[in-house]
Amino acid sequence: MSTTKFTNATGAPVSDNTNIMTAGPRGPALLQDIWLIEKLAHFDREVIPERRMHAKGWGAYGTLTVTHDVTRYTKAKLFSEIGKVTPMFARFSTVAGERGAADAERDIRGTALKFYTEEGNWDIVGNNTPVFFFRDPLRFADLNHAIKRDPRTGLRSADNNWDFWTLLPEALHQVTVVMSDRGIPKSFRNMHLFGSHTFSMINAANERVWVKFHFRTQQGIANLTDAEAAALVATDRESNGRDLLDAIERSDFPRWTLFIMTEDQAKTHKHNPFDLTKVWPKADYPLIEVGVIELNRYPENYFAEVEQAGFSPANIVPGIGFSPDKMLQARLFSYGDAQRYRLGVNFNHIPVNAPKCPFQSYHRDGKMRTDGNLGGTVTFNPNSAGLWDNQPDFAEPALPLDGEAAHYDHRVDDDHWEQPGNLFRKMTTAQRQVLFDNTARAMGDARPHVKQRHVENCTRADPAYGAGVARALQMSSRVAAE
Ligand code: HEM
């Protein structure tokens, strides 16, 4: 496409982009100045909805290279042989802040990965922490209402945030991670990436194992203190994006080693293995090395490639499957739904989202269909044209399920405290003090009874945890009579 001539959107030359057409030099504008109208009308529509959460993010392209044989667990083509390279795209984000928020905030980091495999796109839409605040998707909208802006003041509210978190005992594990010294990663390069949920892998014999995905940084873990982050934000709100860009431009490509953990005895697993608020301890589930991802190409255009990227846990490929994790199950709906709203029904045709293998689905029409819309191909199935039909060879093995449909109280008999307590007990004295101080600062002007509730939750995890937070908050660490 020639770029030497300035044209309007339909290709006609623009004769004047400096002076609008008026009736006489002092007169009003004319409606027939179609270039003015086109220019303003396009500008008026430049903004699209931001992601409801994870709105602030940065992306890069790269590769996944297989270094170890895991074909006994999965028939996924991307893992079929050592040395195999699959192209990928990653987007890293904060959760609570809007599109213009500063990067160096105390918050979870989203770690969305899209692998363009020969059998379709596989997405891992994870975080830099292995657990999450809760295990029932009904709480997700509430989480976002609690951590985003207060409906009356339009301000972020520590009271809303902590009122909600402290009323969910299962949140303490994630809250402890976020308030710890790991709560503000120095850069995206200096953090691990987790698939978080339990997924499944299916091998060539159609046998299923449950699996967790961990990507461990090769750059080493590095974090900012609250004070360092505040100083950084004062001079650079895009510190994590800039770090990613600079590293790639100086060919210091960030890498993470991919490991899996597997479990085929779900029924005897100590806790529910599909509970997103709990980890599978590394001591019980050793990490199995799989490969390495490397990010080595920064996008050409932020809006086209990063803002328009759409990731979904529903994007799986043969050999990789879901699990009964109810959070994961709800996410299978929510992402595509959000992207149909945010980007339009044909969002999978946008180059960053489009599979790099042939794809033909009988979907037709819809806003912004720009690829020829299958031309004259019949778009119904079954058809006599011998076109695309069921592929039973790719059916997953049947998953035995039992149980009566009901709303089960998932908090009954559950141990919310052991794992956050274990995490606390692993910390050094200095790390514990950082946790206490970060918590006290983050709780800010939350009301006293909210602070007291948090102290009580921490005390149940470990009395020293509760006592330390109470000290930092200058409160009592007594546990209220239950
Ligand atoms: C973004 C829903 C839990 C990680 C999003 C988006 C939605 C959503 C609607 C915006 C998608 C878009 O506009 O493209 C949900 C729901 C959840 C849930 C309903 C629970 C029921 C989680 C969990 C994780 C996670 C547990 C991590 C383990 C992410 C990431 C993004 C995201 C990384 C940003 C993706 C990107 O970079 O484009 N989520 N989410 N979410 N979510 Fe979730």
Image (cartoon, rainbow, N blue to C red):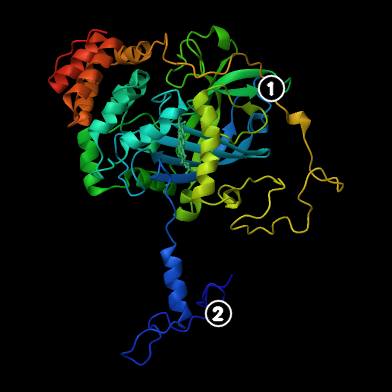
Using the rendered image of the protein, determine whether residue 225 is visible from the camera's viewpoint: no
Q: Residue at x 49, y 10 (%)?
A: 284
Q: Is residue 480 visible?
A: yes
Of the residues shown, which amino acid type is indicated by label 2?
Ala
Discs 1, 2 touching: Cβ within 8 Å: no
Which mark, by number, is residue 128? none
Q: Which one is closest to the eye, mark 1 or mark 2? A: 2
The residue lying at 18 percent from left, 10 percent from top is: 478
Measured as percent of width and height from the top left, residue 244 is found at 40, 44
Other-residue count near label 1 (Cα within 10 Å), few / some / many at <14 / 14–19 / ≥20? some
- The C terminus - image quarter: top left
Q: Earlier in the sequence, mark 1 or mark 2?
A: 2
- At 26% from the left edge and 40% from the top edge, which residue is drawn? 156
Q: Nearer the viewer, residue 261 or 294?
A: 261
Identity of the residue furthest to the left in this view = 474
Q: Quadrant of residue 106?
A: top left
For disc 2, the marked residue is 12
Q: CA distance from mark 1 to mark 2?
A: 57 Å
In the image, is the residue at mark 2 within 8 Å of ligand 1 by its beta carbon? no
Please give the residue where the numbered disc 1 appears in the rendered image.
Answer: 203
Quarter-of-image position of residue 145:
top left
Q: Secondary structure at mark 2?
A: loop
**149 shown above or below 455:** below
Q: Indicate the amino acid at tag 1.
A: Asn
